[in-house]
Each structure stands twice: as structure tokens, then as C-alpha cells.
Amino acid sequence: MQTKRSSIDRVHPQAELIQEGAEWLKAGELVAFPTETVYGLGANALDASACAKIFKAKGRPQDNPLIVHVCNRTMANLLVLNWTTAAELCVQHFWPGPLTLILPKTVLVPDIVTAGLVNVAIRMPSHPVALRLIEATGFPIAAPSANLSGKPSPTSGSHVWCDMKGKIPLILDAGACLVGLESTVLDVSGGIPTILRPGGISKEQLEAVLGEVLVDAPTEKQAPKAPGMKYRHYAPQGELLLMSGIRERVIQRMGQEIQRGHARFKRVGVLCTSESAPFLHNRLPDLLFVLGSKDRPQEVASNLFEGLRLCDERGMDLILAEGIEEEGLGSAVMNRLEKAAGKQSKHI
């Protein structure tokens, strides 16, 4: 399949490009489009055959649910059986935005979208291109991240092109995503609201509105309740070692790992904060990528997947990643790094 990559204005999307994307989606095909979090790989959420193409293009396991994107509350009401009080509060305070709600689904939602679960994952993105595209189709769009399954999520059109060229007909490229990490997934189907995946809305922000909020801790054998809960995820091709703790010790240990890696003829990449970069630069890694300041987790979040993908592009065999404090958006950053590292994580 020939893939067309079209540059689209983020703030004022060209009507002809929105219409082109909508026509492909109405025909049962896939379209990659930007959201404020990451790029999505979209299909008609009400068409089981179209949604099946998402799993094929990504190489995605069938037991991994999809997030359904809507452009207004009327569309959302068609998908949700009943709205809880917590869900209503979340809609008022965080939609449109990077928050996915887990709620009981109606019969309109195909089982392939929810992986056979009784709940649906639904959100309203804030990106103008995404909203215009959904509005133009007239139906909700199921859209996981537009990358090959298990690999770092795409935060630019070039990332999508790298993974999806030849697999889909159209990529709407609006440049870099603002948040850079996927949405927070929150179960508000009943009981105490529970975070199933940390993301663009922090636990602290949710607690300010909802009161008590729990965090789910899935086991490796547990079937995923929501997207992004697989243990090994967001992973680059090279081995990734996550190091967190006292910064001086992390820098020292990274220097040792760089030496060990070079002794084994490995190309070593380093992902670190701007505070640590001057010290690690002197340790002569093959690639040093500065994620941002430890005091600005939003900066780190927006650069994380770019750094992981750059390590792949440059052929890094070993990647050393510096952790940050697990507060606010830092929790989501560490969640992605821990999943990318698998069990290769050290607190120093």
C-alpha cells in the first residue's frame, strides 16, 4: 500500500486534508493523526472489520483494548451505558484533554475494541486536528498509538512514517505532540476511581477533583484492563537499563556501565536530565540525549519517546536512562521507562 504523508496545520487544519482523512475512515481504512499526547492510528470505532486492521498494522495482541476518541458529549453518550458521578466530574474538569475514562459500554461498541471486556476506554482529545477529523467522520474513532506494538510511541509524523509506511493510506502530520506521553487511563465504572495507566493527567490533579484515587498494580499474568498495561512496552531495540536514586551515585554508576559496554564493543546511549548531562558527557557515551530538567517533568515527558527512538536510529546496543522523581507527571515518565526496561531497573 502506498502511504501519503500530508502536512496539516495544527491550529487551523486545512479542510481538504480533514475531508481526505474522513473519506478514508468512512471507507473502512486507517488514518494516522495527531493528538496532544501521541499520534493515533485511527479506524471507525463502530466497524469491527476496520478496527481489526489496527491490530494487523501494529502487530498488536488481540487482548489489548483500544481507546475510543470522541469530539463531543453526544457522541460519547452513544458508547457509554451509564455515567458515574466520578465520570461526570472528570468530563467537567479534564475534557477535552489527556484523560481516558473506563466506563460500561453499550452494544454499539464492538467486542474487538474492548477485547471482550464489558467496559470501554473513551476520551475526548484536545488537539484541533483530532477533533476536526472525528467531527468530519460523524463517528467515534478507535485509535491506539500509531507505532509498531511494543515500540516507543510516536510523537511526530516522522515517527509514524518510520513505523507505518506502506501499511496505511494516510498520515496527517502536524509536527510534534505537546504532551508527549499517552493519556492517563482512569477506571470510573464504579467504586473508588482507579488509575490503570498514569499519563498526561496526574494522580494529584485527579485527587483535587475526586478525592481518593487508587493506582492499579497489575501482575505480569493479569489480562490488561486497559491499553498500555502489558509488562514489556515502549521498548527500544537496544537493552535499556533504568537507574534512579541519588544523582551523584547514578552518574557514577552510569560511567561504570559506559566503560563496561565499550569493553564489550557495545554502542552506549545515555538519556539523562540537563543537570546530569555535563558530568555524563565527560564519560564519552556514543550518544547523549538530554531529556530536560529534573524540575520540569513536562519537558522530560515530551522528549522521552524522541530519545528512545533516536537510540534506535543511531544503533545503540545499550541505553542507560536516568530516572526522575515519581511526583505529578514524573509518575507517568517512570511508568514508561520501567516498562521499556522490563526488569532492568536499579535504584541506587
Image (cartoon, helix red, strand yellow):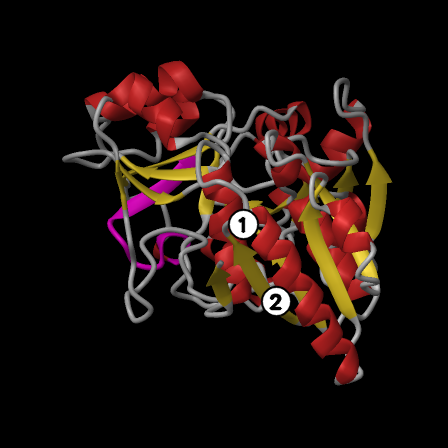
Q: Residue at x 62, y 41 (%)?
A: 38
Give the image quarter of residue 174.
top right
Q: Secondary structure at mark 2?
A: strand
Disc number at residue 320?
Answer: none
Q: CA distance from mark 1 to mark 2?
A: 24 Å
Is residue 121 a member of the stretch shown in magenta?
A: yes
Q: Residue at x 43, y 52 (%)?
A: 227
Report if residue 152 is visible in the image.
no
Give the residue number, with chain letter if any, for mark 2.
Answer: 240
Q: Mark 2 is on which residue type?
A: Leu
Q: Residue furthest bottom?
A: 264
Q: Comparing marks 1 and 2, which lies closer to the viewer? A: 2
Q: Residue at x 63, y 26 (%)?
A: 127
Residue 245 left/right relative to 32 = left
Give the image quarter of residue 261.
bottom right
Q: Nearer the viewer, residue 109 or 122?
A: 122
Disc number at residue 144?
Answer: 1
Residue 81 location, x and y as percent? 24, 34
Residue interval drawn in magenta: 112-122
Residue 210 location, x and y as percent? 26, 21
Q: Are marks 1 and 2 in contact (CB under 8 Å)?
A: no
| Image vertical order of residue 237 relative to residue 86, above or below | below
